[in-house]
Image (cartoon, coloured by chain):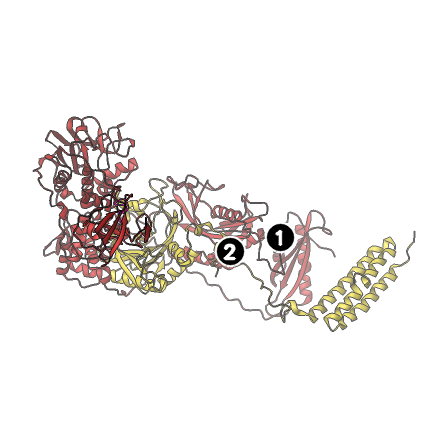
Chain colours: A red, B yellow
Amino acid sequence: MNISFEWLKAFVPHDLSAEAVRDLLTMHVATVEGFERIRAELDPFVVGRVVESEKIPDTRLSFNKVDDGSGTLLDVVCGAPNVTVGASYPFARTGTRMPGGLVIEKRKIRGFTSNGMLCSPRELMLGDDHDGIMTLDTDAAPGTPLLDVLKLGDVRLAVDVLPNRPDLLSHLGIAREVAALTGKPAGMPAELAAVKGVKRAVRGESSESAGGVSVTIEDAADCPRYCAAIIRGVKVGPSPDWLRRRIEAVGGRSISNVVDATNYLLHGFGQPVHAFDLAKLAGAKVIVRRARPGERIVTLDGVDRALSPEVLVIGDGNAASALAGIMGGQASEVTGATTDILLEVATFSPRVVRAGRRQLGMSTDASYRFERGIDDAAVARMAALAGGLVIAVAGGVIEALIDVGAKPTARKSVLLQPTKVGKLLGDRVGSAETVKILESVGFSVAKGDAGLRVTPPSWRHDVSRDVDLVEEVARLRGYDRLPDALAGSRPSSVPDHPLYAVGVRVRDALVAAGLCEVRPLPYIASPDSGSLGAVRVRNPIGEDEPYLRTQILTTLARRAEYNLSRMQRDVRLFEIGTSFVVAASGDVREEMRVGALVMGARRPSHFTEAEPPAFDAWDAKGLAELIARAAWRGARVDITEGSAGTLWSVAVDGAARGVVRSVELDAPVWAAPAFGVEVTLGRVATAAVAARGTHDYSRGEIPSVRVPRRYVALPTTPAAEFDLALVVPDGVPATEVERLMRRTAGETLESIALFDEYRGSGIPVGTRSLAWRLTFRHPERTLRDKEVEGRRAQVLKMLGQELGISVRAG
Amino acid sequence: MSGATLTIGDYQALVSAFEAEAMPAIAGADSVDALEAVRAKHLGRAHGWLRTLSARLGELDRGDRAAAGRAFNEVRVRVEDALAERQQTLAPAREGGALADPTMPARHSWAGVVHPVSQVLDEMIAIFRELGFTIALGPETESPWYNFGALNFPADHPAMDLHDTLYVSDDVLLRTHTSPVQVRTLQAYPPPIRVLIPGNVHRRDPFDASHAPAFTQVEGLVVDEGIGFADLKATLNHFARRFFGAAKTRFRPSYFPFTEPSAEMDVVCGVCNGSGCGVCKQTGWIEILGSGLVHPAVLESAGVDSERYTGWAFGMGPGRTALARHGIPDIRILYDSDVRFLGQFSR
């Protein structure tokens, strides 16, 4: 909402600077986001009086002596025909920057020195007139700032009015607040003093006629109140300067005296007013009704719109002539030829206006105010004022004032315990002060045994509970004046969500492993392959990415491609985020997952290793283990052969948790292969916790207490070890060999480690060589060589018998 | 045929002689230079022993060559190993000890990175954890009731326009704020409640330099008996001092359907210290968070006695803070995941 500092001052005369008003509003009412001086470019201009003037022969020029209040008469050459001795003009001293950008300098013209410039309206960007310099109708002393004489200076304040305070969408509304905060009374602007001569209204319940016009409301729920001022004999033309200035001060464009008068009501009082050309209303009828199916209208913006019964219209005898509360129709627009008008000042249902304008995909100053709520008690008064203003600026007579509909009922009162104010604000605010504050912004307060019975003013739509009144007291006293004291706190009954701690542990482990965390958008182009139903957003931001991802790796693959496209070949990314699928029940199922993708060099290059090896599948398998162990401390982690399309499956304590796989990328030829891990950390419950308005304290997640790891005594006896280089037939997996070795090596076996794989010369085709180191230890004594040798023989025998494995020769 | 001029026995003797001469020479070399001389004499390409032995393999019977080659190789490996070992003893320079050129760069492993938004979030969480806050999480897909109705949004009201919403269906939307978790938490646990709620939220905003359709929020909720605005101010002021080092804050009126009274907190602009500059749009203040006392309707949505219990809540965007603190001009950079960008924030 743009507020003109000068216009505001007309409503509430005060002596604050514009900056002070800005700060006052921001701290007590609504944030002032913009602060713009209007005509600041005219600040340097002063009143200059021509004391002597003579024509320069054979030119259009005159040579003048100008008094600019400096005490020295200045020589000024001027080309205008209307220089008059004794008259005052806008004067630019040397060094002044003109609104067009030119800087006035001392210069010689035809041998005469000129020390400044007398200005035309166009040179000051105050109009198109360039026929002569601008004569000032003033007796102000030479040297007086021009803006003091022209009264054109102003400050435009952009106030961020939030949806709960539509009453602030006008100068009157802001003035009420300034009045309450400064103690200065708000009243009618002086410029409206001449507005008068309004007739008594003719009232009807749902329909009424007067002045040859009939007004009918079909459904009071859509339009509780409709006032129409019938004015005949207006002369549509330019607005008077004061009115044009007001409209321009809030960033509007002056259109005509009649239209500007309606906009004065809108911006000044928050009341949308529409003017119809009465001659264009068929049958001189106004019918407030829903649009008929298939009905159309061309609105003032020239758009031909198809209407539906969701839209409320103002119909005449034939057709829709306006979108009620939204925009007028072109057919009944006020033009230069208009002589008779109907001024509409009404209350339309916020819901209906909102539904209609959303249906039509439009928003206007009028609809903005109607859908938030206007001061419905002021409608008849505003109609009278609108009529009076129009005839004051455009002539004509008000033939009738029609007022159809019910007067609004009084607002519901709210009971406030004065102690509640202090309780919530932590401050001793006396009952008397509370009453004073509330009354200052229009509330009426009655004291009773039960507490204060407070009735909001008709322009307030945001007050229905006692806390709303507490806010009034808090903000008008000032939040900064409220005390600041920590309450003693009791421990939260809510434990950390189990997944939070898990996520942090996994993140720290992956960062320590050299991966980079990312937080990309979760939207994707098409459903991930091989997953359950992907969730589609009904109204996506872009049709190119309408789905929510079902896998983190899908997002990471796109981010890896982004890096490749920027010639980054070493990519190590991970994300801990949400995956979404449509479950069999039709509900969305959310999981917190971790995805990790690695490609390119396993280490940074160094002079000892110019080209480090690239990440391979084994690195990815290791990341899967790292993730699983970080997430589930002490649990059994099994990484087993994966199903189709994956390298491995990850299971934790026997439950499937994730996969390791190659990641297909749209990659350039120089890119290394990409490997990915995706592990589900847990479900995020999407179901309701409890029914509306109730709680269910049995539903809270209680994290389980972790079983601590037991200490194992460090060995005091020496280990014995031997290596086995075996020839293993293809098709026998290493884990199977290990399993057999563990089974047959006896209880003194401490560990088995695979340390080599070899294929090639010396190894028969269809086999490979695998080498293990077996470590043995007896808890109490040193193992004898014969014992170890016996174990070795036993292991080899069993390997040979059961798996066809032999010792590698040589 | 027997064109051989050398028998296998002779060859083996030669090899043994070579080893017998080379080994003491290697062991006796007392400097790197001396060792280099030994290497040249015995293993040198031009006229070392090795070359000789290798050349003379051809003089053997074909049938003997394999065995001779094996013998030759075994000795060669032993001599080379001895040389390398002696080299290590004489000049251990490459692995620890005095370095030939200590200005050479260190060997690194990759540095991992916590995303700058997570870093901000971590710092925020750390401060509130000191004050007894625990972490609550909730789903990103929500019902309209949890996202709006339970939070006192008037049905079909312009307040909804502040939350342009992505819908999955009539009954499911992508949460526009983390506040639904307030209601979920209040339904699942009795007061006293002190929770911090980090999470991703979605708005139907175009992806441009200053907007992202999905972003991270963190909000806090305190509900207990006797909680009021003074506690809100004191806690958030403490946070502002700790997190921003802010000497001054201010609270000004605002509107959120789920708080009443509602307040916006600003901290004094760290760039101009309050005198007004481009960063703070000439106001001297930077908007940090929205807050307010929990609206009784929200407590009632969760079946909490709103006369007995009161509370306060706040919410803020770690993403915006990350942009401001690091001078990142375009929010999309946070999402691009360029490894060069991320690398700037390694710890």
Image position, residue A548 (x, y; %): 42, 44
Q: Can you say which quadrant of the picture contains the C terminus of chain A?
A: bottom right
Assess disc 1: are there few (<14), some (14-19) or many (≥20) residues with their C-alpha within 10 Å of its C-alpha: few
Looking at the image, residue A12 sits to the left or right of residue B331; the answer is left
Image position, residue A271 (x, y; %): 18, 42
> Along the polypeptide, which appears first: circle 2 or circle 1?
2
Identity of the amino acid at label 2?
Leu
Please check the rendered image and state whether residue A122 is part of the magenta-colored stretch, yes or no.
Answer: yes
Q: Which residues are magenta?
A: A118-125
Assess disc 2: are there few (<14), some (14-19) or many (≥20) residues with their C-alpha within 10 Å of its C-alpha: many
Q: At 72% from the left edge and 49% from the top edge, which residue is drawn?
A: A764
Q: Mark 2, chain letter? A: A
Identity of the amino acid at label 1?
Ala
Depicted B288 relative to depicted B85: above or below: above
- Badge 1 is on which residue? A734
Q: Which mark is residue A515?
A: 2
Q: Mark 1, chain letter? A: A
Quadrant of the rendered structure where residue A373 is? top left
Question: Residue A670: in sight, yes or no?
Answer: yes
Looking at the image, residue A190 sits to the left or right of residue B116; the answer is left
Under circle 2, the secondary element is loop
Image position, residue A737 (x, y; %): 63, 53
Depicted A559 relative to depicted B57: above or below: above
Under circle 1, the secondary element is helix
Looking at the image, residue B347 sits to the left or right of residue A302; the answer is right
Image position, residue B223 (x, y; %): 28, 58
Please check the rendered image and state whether residue B111 is part of the magenta-colored stretch, yes or no.
Answer: no
Q: Which mark is residue A524?
A: none
Asked whether the beta carbons under mark 2 and mark 1 sit within 8 Å of each other, the answer is no
Name, please, the residue furthest toward the left: A200
Instruction: Quote the CA–CA distance across marks 2 and 1.
Output: 30 Å
The overriding secondary structure of the stretch rendered in magenta is loop
